[in-house]
Amino acid sequence: MNPVLRWFHQLGSPPYFDSFAARWSPWLFAAAIALLGIGAWQGLFVVPADYQQGDSFRIFFVHVPAAMLSLMVFAAMAAYAAIALVWRIKLCEILAMACAPVGAGFTVITLVTGSIWGKPMWGTWWDWDPRLTTELILLFLYLGVIALYGAIDDRRNAARAAGFLAIVGVVLLPIIKYSVVWWNSLHQGQTISLLGESKIDPSMVAPFWIMYAGMLCWFLASLLQRARADNLRRESGKDWVAKLSGGEA
């Protein structure tokens, strides 16, 4: 078997995944803290003030990465859920459900920082702008997945029902992304591009991507930690969990 395929096959084993998550989540949390510290320092103290917005623009370094991850995490959740529904892979069910609380957190950060940024720019904390409204709907979808997963006692049936909601909800993602293009919007258009040229000052590019990398590492660490906890709960009657508990005790 191809080594990469063999590794993915092994990763689907509950004991192997537990070991993998326990090993890597602390390193990812450490990387996240380091990257976020460096990015925040550069964004606050190194990058010059914006010629129009002054220092209020600095919330950009939190708001935009969080917004990007709110969409990316939902897409990942839907992808895991689709794999779980088609191939009945239990680990993908666990990973899909572990995405939801973290993605909801990024969405809350996006909405809160957007409101804080909007007050001096638009003169109001909230406007029913297409981008803001669709991002709020995304938060409700996340909360719906979380609530549905918690409302059904059988974990596998709960994950399948909540996963189906995530798959249906993925149609919202392109609407959020292109809402500033399709409708008249107060929200500014896309300024950051991974492949093309970004529409921001070059001094802002590196701190932005450092902040994004830090938040991404935080997501991955949280995903592994949450998935590991759910995996242990589901496997609580197995011998390998009993041995692990005995070793940790």
Image (tube, rainbow, N blue to C red):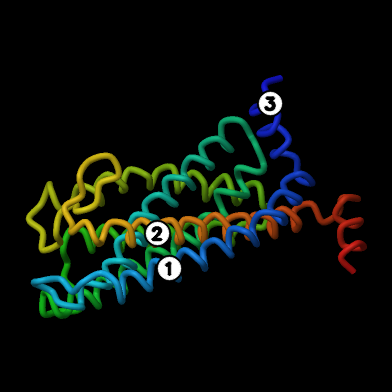
Q: Quadrant of residue 11?
A: top right
- Taking depth in this image into account, of 120 and 4 the one nearest to the observer is 4
Identify which residue, 228 or 36, lies in the foreground.
36
Q: Position of residue 60 (x, y in %)?
A: 26, 67
The residue labelled by disc 3 is 3
In front: mark 3 or mark 2? 2
Is 196 rendered above or below residue 34?
above
Q: Is residue 78 left or right of residue 88?
A: left
Callouts 2 and 1 close, C-beta under 8 Å: yes
Dot 1 falls on a residue whose secondary structure is: helix
- Left or right position of 149 against 68: right
Which circle's residue, 3 or 1, is located before the other in the chain?
3
Q: Is the C-beta separation of discs 3 and 1 under 8 Å?
A: no
Q: Where residue 214 sits: x, y (%)?
A: 46, 61
Q: Quadrant of the N terminus?
A: top right
Q: Which residue is mark 1?
A: 38
Which residue is labeled 2 in the image?
Answer: 210
In this view, 168 is above or below 114: above
In the image, what residue occupies the spot 72% across and 56% down? 22
The answer to which of 246 and 35 lies nearer the viewer is: 35
Q: Residue 129: where, in percent of width, then height?
A: 16, 63
